[in-house]
Structure formats: C-alpha cells, structure tokens
Amino acid sequence: MAGAIKGRGALSQPPGRFDKLTQTLEHDGWYEDEAPDKRETVVLPEPARSVISRNKSPDIHFQVSINPYRGCEHGCIYCLSGETPILMADGSTRLLEALKVGDAIYGTERQGWNRHYVKTRVLAHWSIDKLAYRVTLEDGTTLVTGADHRFLTERGWKFVTSPESGHARREHLEMGCRLMGPGPGKTDIANEAVRSSAQLAVKSIESLGKTLRLFDITTGTEDFIANGVVSHNCYARPSHAYVGLSPGLDFETKLFYKADAAKVLESELAAPRYQCVPIMLGANTDPYQPLEKSLQVTRSILEVLLRCKHPVTITTKGALVARDVDLLAQFARDGLTRVMFSIPTLDDDMKRVLEPRAAAAGARLKAMRVLADAGVPVGVLVAPIIPVLTEHEIEAVLEASREAGATIAGYTVLRLPWEVKDLFREWLAEHFPERAAHVMSIVRSMRGERDNDPDFGTRMQATGPVAQLIRQRFQLAVRRLGFVADRRNLLPTNLFQPPRRTHPQMSLDLPL
C-alpha cells in the first residue's frame, strides 16, 4: 500500500468506475502542506456543448445542476474489443475502434421508471491493454471484453466477472442471465422501450488467457449499444465527467474547466423551450475549489444567472464563495439563492487527512458569516458523517454554524459507491488502522451489510440502529438551535427573464 501524500486524499492510482473530486496547486487560503516530491496538478480547458445537467434520480433533491469544473474522470477499466459493432444514430454500425468524438450513436435514457433508446453522441474515446474475456449469448452473439465491463441485464447492471478472492465481490454475469438490448439485427429503435429476450441470455463466459487492446467511449447517456446489447461506459464518480482518468491521484491532480461555460449557459437559457428550475452549483465538484480564484468560471455563471434573475443554490467546502458576496447579495434581495457549506468536522487534524486541500472549518464559518451578514441565506451540511471518526461532532458543527448565521441544516451519512469503497478502506488503513475494522463494521450495518446500497429510495438513507441514533441526534439538535431541516429548492422561478437571442438578421422594429 502506498503511503499518504501530503496535501492529497488518495493514497494510490487504481483504475475505477466513477469519480468526482477536484484539487489544484493554487493557494487561496486552503491547506497546502505538500512534500518535496508532491504530485503536480494538470489543468486543461474543456469545450462544453451544454453546461446544464438534469437529474432523473427520484431521491435527489434537485432537478438541474451545473458543474463548472471536472474533478476526476479515470482511465476507465470498462472496455470492449475494437471490432465490436456500435449502433449509430442513422441505423448503421461502426466498429468501436473507429468511432470518433462527436459521432452520433444510440444510447438509453430513463423515462419515468423505464429506459428508452435515444440518440446521443460520443464525448470521449480511448483504449487500454487488458486481459480479455469472451461472452457468448444464446443467439451466437459474442462480446470480447474486459472483466470490469458492465452490461445491462433484466436485473440491472452487471460486471462481466467478479474477483475470485478478497472483499470486492460484485454483481456479475452468470449463465442464463439475460442482457437487455435490441439484438444485433435491429437498427430503427428510436424512443422504443429497452427490453430483453431469451436470445440474449448468456451462454458462456471464458477467459481468452491473453491481453488485448480494448476500447471504451464516454457518451451523453453514459451507455451505448454494443453488438445489440446495452453497454455501460465510464463516467464521473458517481455522476458525469468525461476524460478517462483514475479515481485515485488522477482524480485530485488532473482537472478540467469549462472556459466557455457562461456563453453556453446563456444560449441554453435563451432556448424557446427552456423552463426555469432552480440550478444547483456543486452537485458533482466544488464550484469554489482553489482553481476558481484565477479562472472565475463559477463567477461568470453567476453573472449570467443574475442578469436573468434565475434561482441558484450552491454547495461548497470552500471559503472562496465569500468573494462573490456582491453577486449573491443581489440574488438574495429577490430570494433567488441559498448557499450550503459542507462541514464534516471542526477538528483541523481530522480535516487535514479527510479533506487535505479544502478550506479549514474556521475559514468556512467565516465565509458563512460574511454571506449571512449580507443577507444571503446560508446553511450547513454535516457531510459526510463517518461513524466512529466524526459522528461525535454533529452537535458541535451545528452549533458553530448557527453562530455563524446558518439557518438551514442537513446531513448525509458516508456512502461508498463501487470505486470509492476501496479508496476509503485504503485511507482508513493508512490513517486509522486501529479503528478501520470498527468503522467498516458500522458502515456495513447501515447499508444492509454491504459497503454501499445503490438502490433508489434507500441509497441516500442509512438504516439500522446507528443510523437511527444519528438521525435522532441531528433532529434534536436542529430543533434546539432553531434550524430549518429542509433543503428542497423552494426558490421562486417567476422572476426569470430569458437572455435576448441575437441573430445576424436585422430587427424589424424600425423607427417610423
């Protein structure tokens, strides 16, 4: 196991599935105690076709979000043979290795509780050398793939194989398991519901015993149709970022920013069919990470939203948000904003190992007070609450935040999506070896004896006696301190004024 790198949270560079953090070497008052052999940060611009992301999950409290920065996207371990035919948007097929960024293809999209085929585009394309497996279906279809690739089955997404040993067991394909998809012969599938058939049942899975060059793509729908079956692609932890990096140190050192975000946003808001819904800044990556100090992408987005009187909520771990108090105070006069500060601990020593490059709790509380004094509604998220390590601070964090002007409060208990759980175990073993087993035992007890519960309706809520005690403690504290324990987006939308669309054609409103 690698040792801790000062100023970095991850200890290693594993290939993984999804990721979402953002780190940079710029200093704006956040903790930055780097060793001489520090890991350098790479910052690159990312052209954006769209900046507004829409949430379709029934258990997330916001519908629309903008992420000015991409924290991490890994060199994904998903992969297929380059000779796999991919269903294009025009009904033709093209080999996976021949696809290009921008190509129009088919993917799927959840509509209500069902998936339907929709057209999407390739956002990224890369390859990797990996041990290959052959999956054969009842109709003779074959898929040459890596062990970590996932296909959609009638019982959800499943990996090709599961590790033969260790704790990292996972849902994987078995004989007779039916894959979802139109099959290799059907091409006109737009808006049809995604279904399965007996012909797409798994007949065999065999290792080819050799390493092959395998390919993967990222798409706008996070999936694609590979040889007639729905295939998952790589995206950010656990949502969306499209650059193909590791969930470990890449995630903290290779950052992307949307330089043209304000221009793209203005165009999207001006669209005739746009419907105003409060926008969340900070759903995936922190909009006020240190990089924002110089690039000001978040500020440019706020300027567009302010001109349009568009409601916006912000979630951040940073103190830099206080820089934009001039804009946020104008939003607040019309009741159009709310800023939530994520504070998991008041202990600086714990903060240094848990969030090594985030602002200290004291700096966040000072920023909270600056905004509150300017009339901006502010709140606190005690997040994440880690059993044994930080849960004892729930009341203290709430009290300090209330004194700093917070009127809204919420919390989340630690969640460990697939790739995060191994990084977290590694982090525990390095920093808290004597308590690691105890922490994981309680975490699993709150997630149905699993590291993580991915199911809608329960994935955002921990269960069991410890979770119930945390919930009761939180509720008692917020009532005693006079908080409002409600983070729903109840901001007005009736003040929205779309930006004026500009055209090369002259206006017909000529003076008489």
Image (cartoon, grey):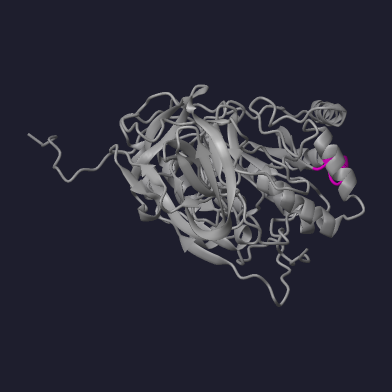
Can residue 353 be found in the magenta stretch?
no
Residue 181 position in % (x across, y down)? 45, 31
Q: Quadrant of the C terminus?
A: top left
Q: Is residue 445 left or right of residue 383?
A: right
Q: In front: 402, or 63? A: 63
In the figure, 381 relative to 242: above or below?
above
Residue at 56% in and 60% down? 211
Give the magenta range: 386-394
Whether the magenta-drawn stretch holds residue 390 is answered as yes
Q: Could you tell whether 223 is left or right of 31 in the image?
A: left
Q: Residue 176 is drawn in which quadrant?
A: top right
Please tell me which residue is depicted at 63% across the width and 63% down the height of the picture: 28
Tell me the quarter of the image containing the N terminus. Answer: bottom right
The foreground one among 290 and 49 is 49
In this rendering, would 119 be left or right of 239?
A: left
Task: Give the camera-side residue of 252 and 275.
Answer: 252
Instruction: Measuring from the top left, give residue 509's x and y in whole percent.
Output: 14, 34
- Residue at 68% x, 72% y: name it: 38
The reply, left or right, for residue 90 in relation to residue 284 is left
Q: Is residue 228 visible?
A: yes
Q: Position of residue 221 (x, y in %)?
A: 45, 39
> In which image quadrant can residue 10 be found?
bottom right
Q: Position of residue 234 (x, y in %)?
A: 53, 48
